[in-house]
Image (cartoon, helix red, strand yellow):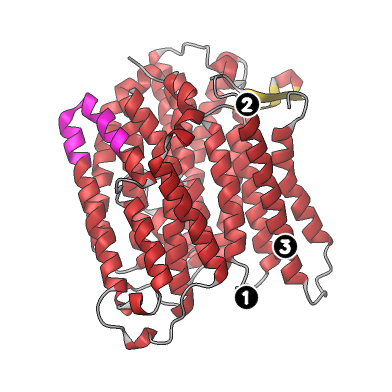
Amino acid sequence: MINIPILSFLLIFPLVGIFVIFLLNKKDEKYNKKVKEIGLWTTLINLIFSLIILYNFDLTESSFQFVENIPIIDDLGVYYYVGIDGISLPFILLTTFLIPICIISCWNKTIKDINYLIISFLTIELFLIGLFISLDLFIFYIFFEGSLIPMFFIIGIWGGTNRTYAAYKFFLYSLFGSMLLLLGILTIYFYTGTSNFTLINKVDFPFLLQLWLFLSFFASFAVKLPMWPFHTWLPDAHVEAPTEGSVILSGILLKLGGYGFLRFSLPLFPDAVEFFTPFIFFLSITAIIYISLIALVQTDIKKLIAYSSVAHMGFVTLGIFSRNIEGLHGSMFQMISHGIVSAALFLCAGSLIERKEKKNISFYSGLWKKMPFLGSFFFIFILGGIAFPGTTGFIGEFLILVGIFKVKFYLALLAGTGIILSAAYFLRLYGRIFFGNINSNISSISDLNNYEIAIFSLLVFLVILLGIYPDLLIKIYELPINKLIIN
């Protein structure tokens, strides 16, 4: 494995799928089916590549592995410099796992320009993998920005009635934050003379410079996460995005901010992190409580799940900036857990909405009698969302609460109310949809098909497996996360 550039294979293979799709004859009667098959096989092979990486990954090593370093602009010190550690690997696995699920979710649907949608999925997989393996700040920025483009088109072309507004709002919010990120990267480059992350990580920046750099990176990561009050683009994007777009958005894209804090902010700007920690705690607690109360009064299924994501990301930032072993481990676990659970919740919501084309919660009632399979799966994912013991959601939030308890008792108490509120809005959502008398509008609704049952069964397996045996995930990121701890 040492001599095989497998990270480059992982990065380039989606391009192979895109190229093959362009070679297909559009006049072929089975064109749409072939496009889906190529997209699925491409993403499944990439999933296999990522599992091969996992199999050959050295869990006893905290430094970067599978490193490739090729000059791009040698005179300027810009290199194709890639590698992974235990922090980036779980996000790569999450990406290569969720993208094929999105393609399978499209299988029985009639979608206009399905070829361009599949190409968008492959493109976003390429950009996401690229940013998770990048160890050069300029290359990271290119992939980080590039991930906006396919999601912009997914929302803007295949979204709902208000899709244009939602797509532009998503793009402009992210673009503004990324402009400040670029200024921060340029500042680091001119100060150090390099964009090589491993070399930059050895530099001790002056305190005032750290403050500016932290804020420049924070502007982008806070929007991506999204933190309150930079979250207002998210509900519109989720409501208007197609189901598969919501899965990618909530399952992976929201994690870029947390990944950025762990990868760059904590190791590069430790003094600034300590200075801004009380401010971050204030934003996080506000997100957990205030956004949970907003979720409690929502009438739109997708918007409720979207607001719940903002509240759960508040737990992530609490854990990251606690800077102790429990908080950091919990935040990392929570991001991967939320990626699985939120993707599952949006798939459940999509299965329901696509049958009747209604997002309003009040439109549905008594669905258990008509859709027992969906009701069963949905309930398990709800349990994951409210951090019920035995599910993956419990591990991350419990560790975060322990970590923040060590910092300030009252912060743990306030954050704990978020778990109570999440139980309130999720169980209220479930009860209104599945209990009570059957609404006459849904008397003819059908239960899950075989593709949906297969997808949900796999997601349930992961939710329970990681909830019972969290070491499967913790062992991957344990050593590099431990290096971030500030005693």
Q: Residue at x 39, y 79 (%)?
A: 370
**Would residue 414 be counted in the magenta stretch?**
yes
56 is higher (above) or lower (below) than 303 = above
Mark with earlier residue (2, 1):
1
Image position, residue 381 (x, y; %): 38, 56
Q: Badge 2: how crowded within 10 Å, few (<14), some, or many (20+)?
A: many
Please name the predominant secondary structure of the magenta segment in the image: helix
Residue 251 appears in the figure:
yes
Image position, residue 49 (x, y; %): 69, 40
Image: magenta residue range:
398-415
Mark with earlier residue (2, 3):
3
Q: Residue at x 42, y 44 (%)?
A: 337
* Disc 3 residue type (three-letter): Glu
* Disc 3/disc 1 C-alpha distance (Å): 15 Å
Q: Are marks 2 and 1 in contact (CB under 8 Å)?
A: no
Q: Residue 136: which disc? A: 2
In front here: 57 or 65? Answer: 57
5 is higher (above) or lower (below) than 239 = above
* Disc 2/disc 1 C-alpha distance (Å): 41 Å
Report whether 446 appears left or right of 139.
left
Image position, residue 264 (x, y; %): 48, 26
* Disc 1 residue type (three-letter): Thr
* Disc 2 residue type (three-letter): Asp
In front here: 170 or 378? Answer: 378
The residue labelled by disc 1 is 110
Q: Residue 37: which disc? A: 3
Q: Residue at x 53, y 60 (%)?
A: 455
Report whether 171 appears left or right of 314.
right
Image position, residue 297 (x, y; %): 23, 63
